[in-house]
Image (cartoon, grey):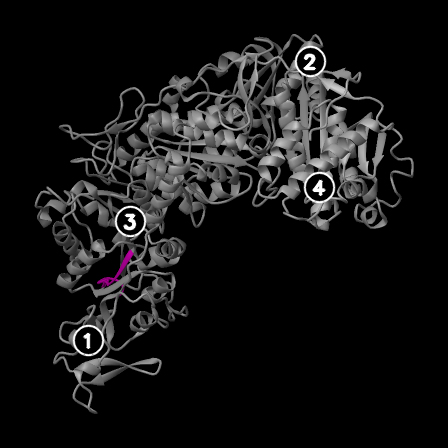
Amino acid sequence: MIAEIKDTQPEALEAVVIRFVGDSGDGMQLTGTQFSDTSAMFGNDVSTFPNYPSEIRAPQGSLYGVSGFQVHIGSVEISTPGDDVDLLVAMNPAGLKTNLYAVKPGHTIIVDIDSFNKKNLEKAQYETNPLEDGSLENYRIIEVAISSLTKEALKDVEGLDNKSITRSKNMFALGMVYWMYHRSPEHTIDFFNKKFASKPHLIESNTKVLNAGFYFAETLELIPNSYTISPARMPAGTYRIISGNTATAWGLLAAAEKSGLELFLGSYPITPATDILHELVKHKHFGVKAFQAEDEIAGITSAIGASFAGDLAITTTSGPGLALKSEALGLAMMVELPLVVVNVQRGGPSTGLPTKTEQSDLMQAMYGRNGESPVIVIAASTPSNCFEFAFQAAKLALEHMTPVILLTDGYIANGSEPWKIKRVSEMPEIKNNKVTELKENWHPYDRDEHTLARNWAVPGTFGLEHRIGGLEKDKITGNVSHVPENHEFMTKIRAEKIERVQNYIPELTTEFADEGDLLVIGWGGTYGGLHSAVKELNKKGYSNIGFAHFNYINPLPKNTEDILGKFKKTVVCELNNGQFVNILRMNFNKYDFLQFNKIQGLPFGNTELVEKFKQLLN
Amino acid sequence: METTNIKKYTFKDFASNQEVRWCPGCDDYVILRSMQKALPEIGVKKEDVVFISGIGCSSRFPYYMDTYGMHGIHGRAPAIASGVKLANPSLSVWVITGDGDSMAIGGNHFIHVLRRNIDLNMILFNNEIYGLTKGQFSPTSLVGQKTKSSPYGNTQPPFHPGELAIGAQARFFARIGGNTPKEMTQIFIEAEKFNGTSLIEILQNCVIFNDGCYTKYTDKDIREDKQLFVEHGKPMIFGKNRDKGLMLNKLKLEVVAIGENGIEQEDLLVHNAKDEDPTLHQMLVRLEYPLVTGIIRSFDDVTLEEREDALTAEVKSKSNFVTTDDLFFSGETYQVY
């Protein structure tokens, strides 16, 4: 049975930010995902941000065990998960305490009153009950006995233990939120039917609780009105909600199909990159060879072996893993084999903040190898365009015979948004440099005159037997060479090969203004935040602020300097202590670059950006 | 790999045009020549042969073979080779490594490649010393051994490669002296025939930094008395006069003299290399007198590639996905008009 939406008079909203918080075992990620999927299917633009602790099940009720899922839905373009929360659903005191800062004054907080007992308040380090001491006066608090209402709703369902009952309370909260935002629970009930196909009692119980929450909200006098958000205007087509990690995996699958090569993944589990491995291992039907290796080094070296043997070779990791791979990455660069290295950045250094986002591996990607060792470095900027950039990473690796590092980050990797599905036929062609037969005077280091890519002679090909390796090679034969002039020549030609990639990548573009007083520069996963902050200022009448976002870091787009010259001030915004800004300073030293940096394991907030830009404009 | 219509090669076909640069008198020359003689016998096409090495004196080996090859980075050859073989299972893949490369810096890859049982052949040049860095102790150096990094004697007890390998689930382990090319060639042929990871330890003399380290076993005059060369299905008999053998006494191997105490040849242990149970193989590997050489273990088992192929076929047969479009448009999609 599906609860029906009665004809009420909802208040129309342009966009809304909802955050679900609770213990790490409370199912907040599932609740948030269900709400965002349902909204996307309704036609809203959507952006999500899961934020969870690095412990799998931190002690119940503790401040550090709070798991959250934020979703931003709108009838307008949504580029970030938003920062100011319109509705907070807090399943316990710790969730309330750690998330109250984000709620806009005057806005709504739903709390599970059952969880506000002495023990939980103590664990959340509340001296007095915030629901009673007046500290929440500025908010609209909706107190609901979610736990006991859930139990009540399930009293007649057979075969349920206490744990299953407690665990379904998140569905009560979701039911309430569905009613408040005028969403049908239908999609979620379909989800139960599929997920619990072999456990009918769980379909029954979850559906009951979801509907109970929905009806409770409808009849509750405490919720004065419901809201509606119309579908967003988006280009026509078939869409699905996709996370950055899935989009990355799918971009690689598409590249394998387009290039006609088999895909080999050598990988070792590491947060937040592991979901790419999880996704690719599923696709044996496409001939994907996903190899979970014994360590990060075996992950990349097995991929180098597969690349030597002619596969589209991939390795996926996060910061500390990239550090372990650096020697092998130098080998791949030296032997000039195609290889895609996906680095899903997280807070560093060392183990750092595994579940939090940061952009602090840029210098490592650029320079973290011994010797003169340039590779292509590109960065995806939104969850859905991880698809394009993963595809592009494979294309560049194959066409230029070089390792390519694709940088994403925890924020876009775990975040999700609508993706207008691409057919492989819509994607650009991918050539490769394979030689299939012996020609007179053939050498393994013969190069394409335009790209300088060497040719790719794969074991099994008659007559092309040759040896490669990490020792310096003769520029033609590829045999070991210690000749001084040859080493200098080879160092320079490997660098030039990467520089020439400029001729094959798109130029940098600006948004909102082509010239003016302030140019906002970003790269990688901060696109959404920076774009919406500049857009907001632009709407408010600031026509003198432009925005340029970099996806290509090494080499930089050809026209970078032309754009820099058109603005009076430039500010480079990064989630690190200033890495890309120094690459720009090194390349364009006649310009002044201002910095705006945040190193808190969190994305930029809209307010802080808008304020900073305003200050720079005045 | 196809074995039909293969050109009849000679050992010269497998020698590259590169000048061999090992020290004069090094056993590595013997190993190289034995390999160049084994490959024509194996009957694999030259273009299907790949040599992958790590770092060290031994690891220059691929440069001297006129096949496909990669001189990798220190310790990682088994992982590189695993990628080559998984990418193209029809290739004949050989790993060349040394005692430092495989058991110190590359210890992790060494044990895992054996555990997985990927069909490749790994040749371990064990000279109980670091040669290329000029004479430091290695994981197989003896306690008390004086080297450049142990001037007062090595204090770190050694690994026995075979013991480590069998502990790591090796299905094929052979050991052979660096000065017995004929037997070595035969073992290379057997290793390639074996379906799974084959490990061959070669007792390789380093003439510069550890000269004579195996003399007490491998010297021509004494080796028949000091080594037991085992063959599957044959009694464990050794000695210049073929008058000694091995018997099992409780949980110990015992050297016995044939004809003494009423012991006949029929009483000796018969070598069963194909036994799944590695207990006796481990005992043979650890024995110091006689030193056991030959193919000690050769247990046929499923390879990783076979498991992967079977799973892939099963998944393919059940899947509706032919192209990525099928995947991308599957499940929860929605239309925007």
Determine if marks 1 and 4 fall on one subunit. Answer: no
Q: Which residues are magenta?
A: B198-210
Q: Secondary structure at mark 3?
A: strand
Residue highlighted by disc 4 = A168
Residue found at x 16% / y 79%: B239
Q: Amino acid at mark 2?
A: Leu
Q: Secondary structure at mark 2?
A: helix
Apparent side of residue B206 relative to residue A124 in the rendered image (left or right): left
Q: Secondary structure at mark 4?
A: loop
Q: Amino acid at mark 4?
A: Ser
Marks 3 and 4 sit apart, C-alpha to C-alpha, by 56 Å
Q: Position of residue A102 (x, y in %)?
A: 76, 30
User: Nearer the viewer's eye, disc 3 or disc 4?
Assistant: 4
Q: Which of the marked residues, 4 or 2, is nearer the chain's N terminus?
A: 4
Residue highlighted by disc 1 = B235
Apparent side of residue B182 relative to residue A539 in the rendered image (left or right): left
Q: Is residue A347 visible?
A: no
Residue highlighted by disc 2 = A537
Q: Amino acid at mark 3?
A: Ser
Q: Quadrant of the N terminus of chain A?
A: top right
Disc assigned to residue B53: 3
